[in-house]
Image: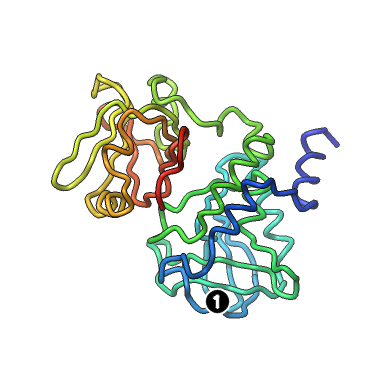
């Protein structure tokens, strides 16, 4: 057994010690602070199996995905994540989420193991072990902001994917490296150089050469949510931020942000929520 495999097994089998910052994030995320869309009814169910694509097949015959996260694209991390989920086939679970389905006919749900105190949150556990990345891009709302703190701790400890250079945040000024990752889900860090507010969308620009540089595209409805939180141009211009999404070839490289929480400020106070 290699050292990296042993570390992975330890990360999966042992409950990681949460530092004070993560515990504080948990304490500050109380149910009454969550959006109404996150307060759906919790119901019993059971994991029946996994689809070839890695989706969850529930005993209620719904196909589901864990909300707020995405599994890694590459092996062995994806295989380890699927192995962890596969070990829970047949176990009773508590499911929370809406009945709305995405274009792949999946419901987006939060799953906790039943019969445990406290109940084990599956998304939390995968993120803690570095076997999932935070991504609420397919969800209508981000219901678990504490996942970002859990991911930060896993990244600092170089657990799972965070020991792999392919998954570490990319520099917004490294245009060539960004172009190599077009079509992939990535984290990008950089300083917002300018902001262009238009009627239908807002652009966060990270350079002066639009045909080469990285841009974040924010639809009007998302920008309004950010403005309502006090996260407008003044809060972002000149700031060092981290954002995540699927890179597209658009006047250099770009991705769209539809969930405000997918942008994090890296210096000074956190962005308002």
Relative to 146, say whether 264 is above or below: above
Is residue 198 found left or right of 225 in the rendered image? left
The chosen color scheme is rainbow
Q: Residue at x 55, y 31 (%)?
A: 168
| Count of marks placed on residues | 1
The quadrant the N terminus occupies is: top right
- Measured as percent of width and height from the top left, residue 182 is found at 40, 32
Q: Residue at x 28, y 34 (%)?
A: 204
Is residue 249 or residue 68 the one in the foreground? Answer: 68
Relative to 104, say whether 116 is above or below: below
Relative to 56, say whether 46 is above or below: below
Relative to 100, say whether 271 is above or below: above
- Measured as percent of width and height from the top left, residue 177 is found at 44, 22
Q: Residue furthest left?
A: 199
Q: Residue furthest right?
A: 1
Q: Residue furthest front?
A: 269
- Measured as percent of width and height from the top left, residue 235 is found at 32, 39
Is residue 155 found left or right of 196 in the rendered image? right
Is residue 92 found left or right of 102 in the rendered image? right
Quadrant of the image occupied by residue 154:
top right
Instruction: State the SS at label 1.
Output: loop
Residue assigned mark 1: 61
- Measured as percent of width and height from the top left, residue 109 is found at 52, 67
Q: Residue at x 32, y 37 (%)?
A: 216
Q: Residue at x 64, y 70 (%)?
A: 47
Within-10-Å neighbours for mark 1: few <14, some 14–19, many 20+: few
Is residue 135 or residue 72 the one in the foreground? Answer: 135
């Amino acid at each position: 057994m290699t050292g990296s495999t042993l570390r992975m097994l330890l990360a999966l089998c042992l409950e990681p010690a949460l530092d004070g910052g993560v515990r504080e994030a948990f304490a500050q995320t109380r149910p009454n602070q969550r959006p109404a869309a996150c307060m759906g009814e919790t119901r019993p169910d059971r994991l029946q199996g996994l689809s070839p694509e890695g989706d969850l097949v529930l005993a209620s015959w719904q196909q589901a995905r864990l909300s707020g996260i995405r599994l890694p694209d590459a092996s062995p991390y994806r295989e380890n994540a699927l192995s962890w989920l596969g070990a829970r086939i047949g176990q009773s679970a508590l499911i929370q989420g809406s009945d709305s389905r995405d274009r792949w006919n999946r419901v987006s749900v939060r799953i906790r193991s039943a019969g445990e105190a406290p109940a084990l949150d599956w998304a939390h556990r995968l993120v803690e072990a570095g076997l999932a990345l935070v991504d609420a891009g397919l969800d209508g709302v981000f219901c678990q902001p504490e996942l970002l703190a859990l991911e930060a701790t896993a990244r600092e400890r170089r657990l799972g994917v965070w020991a792999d250079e392919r998954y570490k945040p990319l520099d917004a000024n490294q245009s060539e490296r960004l172009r190599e990752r077009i079509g992939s889900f990535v984290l990008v860090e950089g300083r917002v150089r300018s902001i262009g507010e238009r009627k239908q969308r807002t652009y966060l620009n990270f350079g002066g050469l639009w045909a080469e540089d990285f841009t974040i595209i924010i639809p009007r409805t998302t920008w309004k949510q950010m403005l309502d939180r006090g996260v407008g141009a003044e809060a972002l211009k000149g700031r060092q931020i981290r954002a995540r999404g699927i890179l597209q070839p658009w006047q250099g490289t770009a991705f769209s942000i539809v969930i405000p929480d997918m942008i994090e400020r890296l210096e000074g106070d956190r962005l308002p929520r």
